[in-house]
Structures are given as structure tokens and as C-alpha cells.
Image (cartoon, rainbow, N blue to C red):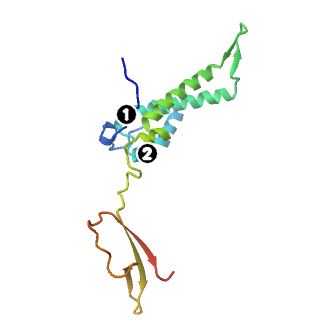
Amino acid sequence: MSRRGRKPVPRAGTLRNTAVGALPRCPDHLSDAAKKEWRRLATPLHRAGLLSLADRAALAAYCQAWARWVEAEEKLAGTPTLLKTPSGYVQQSPWLTVANKQLELMGRYMTELGLTPVARTRLDMPLGAQHAPVDKIEVVIVGVDEDGNRFDKPLLGGQPRERDKPSDNPVTITVNEDL
């Protein structure tokens, strides 16, 4: 008996995030449309830390399902959704069946790859994970004194205030006094 419930939250340090390394190559067997979808998604997913060599097959399967869905939708645009068989029965177009199945498969892979808004909320990654958090902001006035020498001084005057802990990642906002 299998237990159902909430999907597990991907955590940093799992297989998904450990072997990010190089960008996985697009498989040669994909159709042209699938390769185009691969090129659209692979780099952004890799940069976000969501695509590693271990995820290559999942992205390839998604891209191929996407290409088949696009083909089916193009065929559906030129044919009726319902067809009459030679015996007089009405049935849905086989292209509608293909489109619906591929859309279902795409949805599964999109969830696994973090390609939907809900899937992204389940990822255990801080927003802007590629940037270190800012823990100190210094506002500095930049100007030129009477002798023509450039100067920088904190906006609040005097020396910067001492903090309990030095900042590892300060952000400096520069204000030009001539403005």
C-alpha cells in the first residue's frame, strides 16, 4: 500500500544540486523542435542550479513531449476536433488524443524540473540564490573639495558607525554632491 501526501521538498545538497558542474549536452536523438526547447530551457535551469547531468533525461523527455504536443496542436488547427467514422460514429481526432497525452506528460516533467509557479515554491532555495545576502548598506557622498581633490564621506557624517559584526557583503550607495 503506497502512501500519498505532499510531494517532498527538494533540498540543497540532494543529487539534483550536487553535480551541477557542466551544462548537460542536448541529446542527438531529439527532434528539431525538441532541441529548440532544450536550448530555451537548459541554460536558465542550469544557472538556477536546477539542471545537472543527472537531470538530462528528464529534460530530454520534457522537450520531446513538448515537440510532440506542438506537432499535434498544429495538426489540430487544420482538422476538426471530432471526426465521423465510415460507419457513422463520431469520435475525437487522434491528434487531440496525442495533444492531451503529451500535455499530461509535460505537466509531470514541468513539476519535476521546477518549471511551474507552484513547483518553484517547493524548491528549498533562497530567492536570488546566486547572490550573497546584503547585511549592511553604506550611503557615501562623493564630491570635490576646494582644492579639486575628490572625497568620499559617509552621509551621516564622520566615520562609519561600528557594528557588532563586520559586514561580509556591504552595499555602497554613492551620492554625487554636485547633483
Label for residue 8?
Answer: 1
Q: Residue at x 39, y 35 (%)?
A: 56
Residue 91 x/y as whole percent: 67, 15
Between 124 and 66, the one lying in front of the other is 124
- Label 1 neighbourhood size at 10 Å, few (<14), some (14-19), many (20+)? few
Q: Is residue 39 left or right of residue 9?
A: right
Q: Quadrant of residue 15?
A: top left
Residue lying farthest top? 87
Between 69 and 175, the one lying in front of the other is 175
Which secondary structure, mark 2? Answer: helix
Q: Quadrant of residue 84?
A: top right
Q: Residue at x 57, y 23 (%)?
A: 98
Q: Is residue 65 above or below residue 1?
A: below
> How far separated are the C-alphas under marks 2 and 1?
25 Å
Residue lying farthest left? 165
- Label 2 neighbourhood size at 10 Å, few (<14), some (14-19), many (20+)? some
Q: Is residue 69 above or below residue 47?
A: above
Q: Amino acid at mark 2?
A: Thr
Label for residue 43?
Answer: 2
Q: Quadrant of the N terminus?
A: top left
Q: Residue at x 37, y 23 (%)?
A: 3
Q: Amino acid at mark 1?
A: Pro
Label for residue 173?
Answer: none
Please indicate, yes or no, whether residue 176 appears anywhere in the rendered image: yes
Which secondary structure, mark 1? Answer: loop
Q: Is residue 4 left or right of residue 79?
A: left
Please indicate, yes or no, whether residue 28 appears anywhere in the rendered image: no
Q: Is residue 150 above or below residue 132?
A: below
